[in-house]
Image: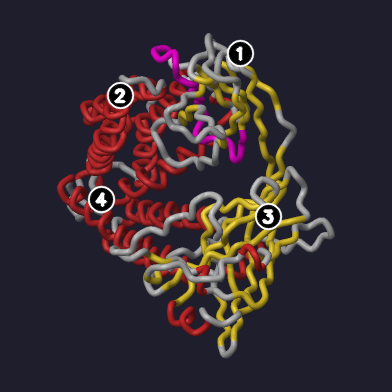
């Protein structure tokens, strides 16, 4: 029985491209061999980390670039003298054969490598299938679709290489322009998925259109329009309206209450130094306090919008990034940063002003603590993690490994030994650490390592505290309760003492008065 046409083309491509394909597979295998050595945090892990970084940032992308270029250019789409147009080739069959080749020799090895690394780390790939698929999506957006589309509108490898370099420079310029114009602004929730969709859809349309019609100019224009369309979308999106719609105002009786600090805790005098102005904006840190929240509640503030009224001035800001400021039972006081144009600040800095703040935050609630025991053998922890002691360093704390990212919010408490587990130099000391929040992003190594470095009340850096085998670890996980919009009104406050300032060079730091002396 005759093979379908795509399989004939696939076999032909494999015969033509076996050196490039074999090189790519060997580099993927080399990364799978080198990456695990970097998880141990040992004194020899630096060499493995360097080799793995060289492979994933340099050698493997170049190998993919060469393989994709040779794959597409084997039946070039540019010009009018292609040999394959006189053969019984149909563009859809040809396109299917190229996709099949990428699936077999790019996507499948990458996927299997990540599954192998997860298994090698003692983790379970079946628990993170969505993360594995999302990583493949990022691979498609960042590498496969752009390189394949560029190869389709170029005729030779040299032109593809130059076009790729030019495309990177072009996208960097557009990205820097966008970042310059929307500096500090909070993006609307879900916008990243829309941008990823555009970044896939438009180049993919250009790629299919090029295979179907071979009208190179139109396909090139579609590729060039992709970054511009994304930039226009960022500018034209009504961010404030979408954020207000996504973060509903909390009006329940048990909603948290935000208020300004008591007058006695607010700074009365402006700090010394020159006003810090960044791109025409002054950063004002407005302290707020939260009350009436459950002891397990915590709010992660992603954006802050401000409305300030003073004599003759009414100023409103868009939502500005607050970089995950925490506010709640664990941290009842926080400083919320507002970037204000310097000309507006100069008009109202010395006079009392009314400030209205709107906070876009994620509401998290701490679960009941769970107890886990540290053992010499690898032991499991919440978040699909696995922890173990470094084999070549008996005085080191355990290192935990997680698939793709650390838990969203996770506090750990433990009782540590001072200096030596067998003969502690001091009584056991309680300690605490936060595992933080790690977002998944495209990376060749799906294993995130995190040493259990606890913080104690002892501020002496020379004192060394250990998590001894057999110690009990108390994990406090958090679950998301949804999005909330919190509001606070601060009446008649003076903003000048709250503005960021830069000390002058010849200014001596202020010395604290001696203990017991009158202030």
Q: Give residue 460's position: percent from left, percent from top.
A: 46, 33
- Checking the image for residue 470, the label placed there is 1
Q: Give residue 133's position: percent from left, percent from top.
A: 51, 36
The residue that label 3 is drawn on is: 483
Do the CB atoms of the residues marked 3 and 1 lie less than 8 Å apart? no
> Which one is in front, 264 or 402?
264
Question: Which is more foreground, mark 3 or mark 4?
Answer: 3
The residue that label 4 is drawn on is: 77
| 69 horizontally vs 327: left or right | left
Identify the magenta region.
391-411
Residue under the point 47% across and 54% down: 512
Q: CA distance from mark 2 to mark 4?
A: 41 Å
Please tell me how crowded label 1 is: few (under 14), some (14-19), or many (20+) other residues with Cα within 10 Å. few
Whichever of labels 3 and 1 marks the residue nearer the N terminus, that label is 1
Q: CA distance from mark 3 to mark 2?
A: 42 Å
Whether 373 is drawn above or below 234: the answer is above
The quarter of the displayed image where residue 58 is located? top left
Please tell me how crowded label 3 is: few (under 14), some (14-19), or many (20+) other residues with Cα within 10 Å. some
Q: CA distance from mark 3 to mark 4?
A: 49 Å
Do the CB atoms of the residues marked 2 and 4 lie less than 8 Å apart? no
Residue under the point 69% across and 41% down: 479
Q: Give residue 64's position: percent from left, percent from top.
A: 28, 37
Q: CA distance from mark 3 to mark 1?
A: 39 Å
The quarter of the displayed image where residue 446 is located? top left
Let me know if residue 466 is in the magenta part: no
The residue that label 2 is drawn on is: 48
């Amino acid at each position: 029985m005759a093979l379908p046409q795509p399989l004939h083309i696939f076999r032909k491509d494999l015969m033509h491209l076996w050196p490039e394909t074999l090189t790519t597979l060997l580099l993927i295998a080399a990364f799978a061999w080198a990456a695990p050595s970097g998880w141990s945090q040992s004194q020899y892990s630096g060499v493995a980390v360097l080799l793995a970084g060289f492979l994933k940032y340099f050698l493997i992308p170049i190998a993919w670039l060469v393989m994709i270029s040779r794959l597409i250019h084997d039946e070039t789409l540019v010009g009018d003298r292609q040999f394959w147009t006189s053969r019984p080739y149909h563009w859809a069959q040809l396109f299917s054969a190229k996709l099949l080749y990428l699936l077999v020799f790019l996507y499948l090895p990458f996927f299997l490598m990540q599954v192998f690394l997860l298994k090698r780390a003692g983790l379970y790939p079946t628990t993170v299938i969505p993360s594995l698929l999302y990583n493949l999506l990022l691979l498609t957006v960042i590498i496969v679709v752009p390189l394949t589309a560029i190869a389709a509108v170029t005729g030779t490898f040299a032109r593809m290489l130059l076009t790729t370099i030019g495309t990177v420079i072009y996208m960097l310029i557009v990205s820097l322009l966008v970042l310059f114009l929307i500096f500090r602004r909070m993006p609307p929730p879900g916008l990243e998925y829309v941008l990823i969709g555009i970044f896939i859809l438009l180049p993919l349309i250009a790629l299919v259109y090029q295979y179907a019609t071979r009208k190179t100019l139109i396909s090139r224009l579609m590729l060039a329009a992709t970054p511009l369309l994304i930039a226009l979308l960022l500018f034209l999106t009504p961010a404030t309206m979408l954020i207000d719609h996504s973060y509903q105002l909390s009006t329940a009786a048990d909603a948290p209450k935000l208020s300004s600090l008591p007058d006695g805790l607010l700074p009365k005098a402006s700090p010394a130094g020159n006003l810090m102005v960044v791109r025409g904006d002054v950063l004002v840190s407005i302290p707020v306090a939260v009350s009436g929240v459950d002891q397990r509640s915590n709010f992660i503030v992603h954006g802050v919008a401000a409305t300030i009224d003073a004599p003759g001035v009414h100023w409103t800001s868009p939502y500005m990034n607050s970089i995950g400021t925490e506010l709640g039972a664990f941290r009842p006081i926080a400083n919320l940063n507002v970037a204000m144009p310097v000309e507006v600040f100069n008009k109202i800095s010395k006079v009392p002003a009314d400030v209205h703040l709107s906070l876009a935050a994620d509401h998290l609630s701490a679960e009941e603590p769970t107890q886990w025991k540290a053992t010499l053998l690898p032991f499991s922890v919440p978040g699909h993690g696995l922890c173990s002691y470094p084999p070549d360093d008996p005085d080191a704390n355990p290192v935990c490994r997680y698939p793709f990212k650390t838990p969203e919010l996770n506090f750990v408490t433990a009782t540590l030994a001072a200096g030596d587990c067998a003969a502690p130099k001091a009584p056991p000391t309680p300690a605490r650490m936060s595992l933080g929040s790690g977002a998944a992003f495209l990376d060749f190594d799906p294993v995130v390592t995190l040493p259990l470095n606890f913080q104690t009340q002892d501020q002496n850096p020379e004192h060394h505290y250990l998590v001894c085998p057999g110690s009990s670890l108390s994990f406090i996980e958090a679950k998301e309760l949804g999005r909330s919009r919190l509001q606070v009104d601060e009446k008649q406050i003076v903003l000048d003492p709250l503005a960021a300032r830069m000390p002058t060079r010849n200014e001596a730091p202020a010395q604290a008065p001696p203990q017991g002396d009158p202030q």
